[in-house]
Image (spheres, rainbow, N blue to C red):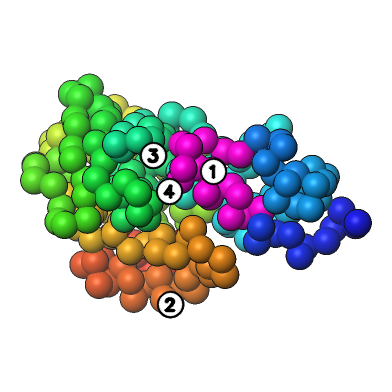
Amino acid sequence: MREDDASWDEDVRLAVYRAFARHGRAPGAPELAAAAGGSLAVAKQALHRLAVARHLVLDECEHVVLAHPFAAKSLGFSVMGAHTLWWGGCAWDSFAIPHLVDAEPEVLVATRCPGCGQPHALVVNRSGPPEGRQVAHFPVPAARMWDDVLRTCANQRLFCCESCVDAWLAHTGQSRGSVLDLVTLWRLARGWYAGRLERGYRRREPQDAVAYFAEAGLTGPFWAATAGV
């Protein structure tokens, strides 16, 4: 069996995503090897190809750190279902998990406002957006989100209100990006990852992403996904 055999890529991708969905963690070496016909070397080659194709993110030790909407470490959000606890990749991803995982249609999303440290806990489900004055701030335009995707995700956070966004921007020196209320955030998240746990999933082309964003109420240069997201 050749290590560059790409025929196992989809099996490895599914093993990664389904392990996160079911257990809240990335698959271990035995699980990865089993998904690649018994070869961990083949699985690792598959992981690298999947990372290049933006299906997941690896760290310097070849471990999966992000498989959107799931994270392997804390990026500011915990997402608790009835049976599973996840790290959410960002505000967007945390709101997406109950829409993606059939067994967990309602979750508790917990985080802290980066502007003032106030804790927040929101019940997020499929029936409609949660109530609240909180807002999400996205500092990086859609076309550049994958330039440094870990940094992008770590900064897509929930704030108490726009005043806390302004305070955080003044403190960090970052530029203001796009501010979303909870309704818009929920609309953005609810269908973005549809099909990701199924065989044959394909990422959206940039023009399809722009159309999706527009349906969620997000338009303009910031949401022009010219390089894909």
- Of callouts 3 and 2, the N-terminal one: 3
Amino acid carrying label 1: it is Ala
Give the labeled residue for mark 1. Answer: 19
Task: Tell me where the magenta segment starts and ends, as one range.
Answer: 12-27
Give coordinates of residue 218: x percent, y percent.
25, 65
Q: Nearer the viewer, mark 3 or mark 2?
A: 3
Q: Distance between the residues labelled 1 and 3?
A: 15 Å
* Distance Cα–Cα, label 1 vs label 4: 13 Å
Of residues 177 and 228, the one drawn nearer to the viewer in this rendering: 228
Picture quarter with the N terminus: bottom right
The quadrant in which residue 219 appears is bottom left
N-terminal of the two: label 1 or label 3?
1
Disc ID at residue 69: 4
Q: Mark 3 points at which residue?
A: 88
> Given contact means CB atoms under 8 Å apart, are the residues at marks 4 and 3 in contact?
yes
Identified at 52% across, 35% down, the residue is 25
Q: Name the residue under label 2.
A: 207
Is 18 colored magenta in this rendering?
yes
Kindly report the secondary structure that dominates the magenta region of the rendered protein. helix
- Residue 222's mark? none
**Foreground of the two, 169 or 109:** 109
> For numbered disc 2, what is the local secondary structure?
helix
Answer yes or no: is residue 177 visible.
no
| Residue that appears at 61% across and 55% down | 13
